[in-house]
Amino acid sequence: MTIRLIVVGKTDTGYLQQGIDEYVGRLKHYVKFEMEVIPALRDQKNASPDEMKEREAQLLMRKLEGCDRIVLLDEHGTERTSMEFAQYLQKQMNSGIRTLAFVVGGAFGFAPSIYASAHDKMSISRMTLTHQMVRLFFVEQLYRAMTILKGEKYHNE
């Protein structure tokens, strides 16, 4: 199974990108992982939040074609512990899907069309996080889940 993380806009904070790179490198030993960045929209000053979400949705839909399962990282999604997330991933791997795509939207979230295309929504935290921080927290939790599934000593419970 391939796990994809699709994000809107590049990570422009060095320490966040460094952390993301660290965990993406670690993930290579466990799962095929791809991170795809959709370029941030230009002319953002003249667009309303709804217009931004719709324009981002058009770009996201191109990347989501062919994904077997789409999970939005959304503040209103299902909250899971690290152990529950590991179990969720195991269930997806056992189901035979080829591509599991996790999606981080832009600063204003997702357009209705993206919500309609999603199979699931997952929350990283009930607190509001920047869409750039979510990337780091997600890849760390994905790595943690993989070590849990392999019975390795990283997660303490």
Image (cartoon, rainbow, N blue to C red):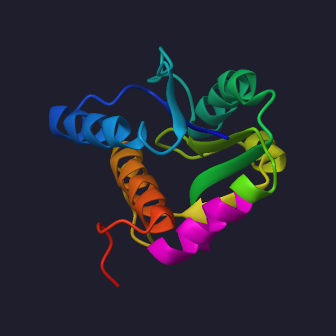
Q: Is residue 43 above or below residue 20?
A: above
Secondary structure, magenta segment, majority class: helix
Tell which of 31 and 9 is nearer to you.
31
Q: Residue at x 26, y 28 (%)?
A: 12
Quadrant hosting residue 59: top right
Q: Is residue 55 above or below residue 74?
A: above
Residue 36 is at least partly visible in this image:
yes
Q: Residue at x 23, y 42 (%)?
A: 19
Tell which of 41 and 152 is nearer to you.
152
Q: Residue at x 46, y 42 (%)?
A: 107
Quadrant hosting residue 95: bottom right
Q: Position of residue 53 (x, y in %)?
A: 63, 35
Quadrant hosting residue 73: bottom right
Q: Position of residue 137 (x, y in %)?
A: 36, 55
Q: Position of residue 23 (x, y in %)?
A: 32, 43
Residue at the outermost front position: 151
Residue 75 is at least partly visible in this image:
no
**Which region shows up in magenta?**
75-92
Tell which of 156 and 134 is nearer to you.
156
Query: In the displayed structure, does residue 5 sit left or right of residue 54?
Result: left
Q: Residue at x 46, y 54 (%)?
A: 142
Residue at the outermost left position: 15
Residue at the outermost bottom position: 157
Quarter holding the N terminus is: top right
Query: In the displayed structure, does residue 12 sit left or right of residue 5?
Result: left
Query: In the displayed structure, does residue 142 sit left or right of residue 24?
Result: right
Tell which of 69 and 97 is nearer to you.
97
Q: Is residue 103 above or below residue 71?
A: above
Q: Position of residue 26 (x, y in %)?
A: 33, 42
Quarter holding the C terminus is: bottom left
Residue at the outermost top position: 42
Q: Is residue 125 magenta?
A: no
